[in-house]
Image: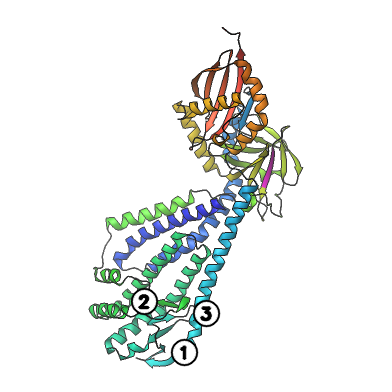
Amino acid sequence: MLLWAAYFLVISGIMSLAALSLEGAMRPYGLPIRWIWGCALIGSLALPIILSAAWGQIDISSVEAESSLKEARQAFAGAPQPDWTTQLPIGLVGHDSVRFDGLLEALWILSSCFGTAVFVGGCWYGYRHRRHWRRATIADTELFVARDAGPAAVGLLHPEILLPEWLLSAAPETLRLVIAHERSHVEARDPGLMGLGMGCAVLMPWNAFLWWQVHRLRHAIEVDCDRRVLRVGHDARRYARTLVEVSTQRPAYLGGLAASSRSFSSIERRLIIMSAPKVRGWRVGTAGCTLFAIGVATAAILISPPAIPPVLAGITGSVAPAGLRGYIGSYQTSPVEVLQVQLRNGQLTAMYPGMKPQALTRTSGQEFRIGHTNAYIRFAIDTAGHVTGLVVQQYGAATEAPRISAVRVHAIDSAIAARVHAQTATPGSQAALRQLIIGIESGNPNYSDLSPQLAAGTRALLPKLQAKIKPLGGLRSIEFRGIDRKGWNHYFVRFERGTASWDIALDSYGIIVGAGLDVESKTHPE
């Protein structure tokens, strides 16, 4: 759930930036801009869901496109394996994280329900006060008159004009301009658009980007309304004075019923926009803003969405995939590693980079055992029967692995290829290896420096690891020998009575996510 909240924030931020850039491109030409922010609000909610569905389809259809990548990895299948290796992801899905995700989900739902209740309550509050308003016809316009509310366009589905009592005694020109302004809101159905924007925001009341988009939408509605009023021939100076005069009055609260022209707009900014001359012809700045908006919006498509949190927490859908082919795909088990699930002669196999494929044997439902190990895979299925990820369980720890597309696989492999080409040790890897060896020798490794599943595996294998290391004697030196084909750091370690090869992988935070040991030789003490 936390990943989904972050994903919605990222997409909302991208949509906000794109809408702001597009508004800058269209505003000088006097074109309507309220639809930009309306689309940004809807896109911030709909785009993550659409992309999630699209990426899921890409993951299923891209198996053949990844065949060359799989063949390259199969070439390493015959390589000798170290005595101990734990290629382990970072993400942990244990009882605590499940409860935390459940808490976040509950807070999300409760906050949305509260926001919806406030919005609906505001509409009800406004409609309730309509009983105290009187009907009147002014300047050939039928409208409402209230004692201390308005001017505003009220009503989401069937908007009407509302004027305050004090405005009836104002100058005729002022009254005429106010009615023209509110009539423009009614004819454009601006209250309905504003209500739609508010409805999007209350679905995610914690999303600051959505509320900022609502603020920009409200301002854009007023700017577009000002332009429509002036376009029919009203005097711009007199209209500006009317806006300032009306803005000094504070109307009663109308809840979610109204699209007010004062409470939520900056009069000063609107006056500046009205006084700006309209641009004619194409400008470089306009082209730049438009291209930037398109580029930013396109960036959202390249961000692969996370898997559905409840599914990865162990809740499977009611529909199983049609045959074993539905499980084929790439699953990201850590920031630096991808688990490949393949189908060979009717048998599902799982393979980490540089390792031999392991047969997957079904134990129950969507759960499979990896080879003859004590590791299990539980596939996550959505309600449509699509595999969205898997959970690896071993040594009492569980790790979530969302299904990713060929684009994401290529990005991970490109990063690994860059490390292999550079043959430069990961900063901090030698110090981390030294602390790991010392910790194993002493029987007290610093488990906080290890990924959760690596820590669980180390605890379970600690006696065996000590049995391999202690006969070698004390640690003497650690020498970097390069980056292997998996992208791991390869070290040659000398002890008092022997040598060993160690492989180690770190994430961007310096946490050890993979380690391998191969005792090479033992010698007599000098």
Which kind of residue does numbered mark 2 sit on?
Ser
Residue 454: which quarter of the image? top right
Task: Give me the residue at 59% from left, 14% from top.
Answer: 498
**For the residue labelled by badge 3, is the local secondary structure a helix, a strand or a loop?**
helix
In this rendering, the answer to whether 258 lies above or below 329 is: below
Over which residues does the magenta segment extend? 375-379
Image spot of residue 230 (x, y percent):
29, 77
First along the sequence among labels 3 and 1: 3
Q: Residue drawn 39% across and 70% down?
A: 218
Label 3 to label 1: alpha-carbon separation: 14 Å
Disc nearer the start of the sequence (2/1):
1
Image position, residue 233 (x, y; %): 27, 80
SS of the residue at dot 2?
loop
Please check the rendered image and state whether residue 376 is part of the magenta-colored stretch, yes or no. Answer: yes
Q: Which residue is mark 3?
A: 124
Are the two marked residues, 3 and 2, in contact with CB atoms closer than 8 angstroms?
no
Majority secondary structure of the magenta segment?
strand
Residue type for callout 3: Trp
Residue 180 higher or lower than 378, as above or below:
below
Asked whether, in this view, residue 117 is left or right of residue 463, the answer is left
Pinpoint residue 315: horizontal percent, then vertical percent.
68, 52
The image quadrant of residue 139 is bottom left
Q: How many marks?
A: 3
The residue under label 2 is: 261
Q: How far apart are labels 2 and 1 at the CA level?
A: 22 Å
Front residue (pair 512, 193): 512
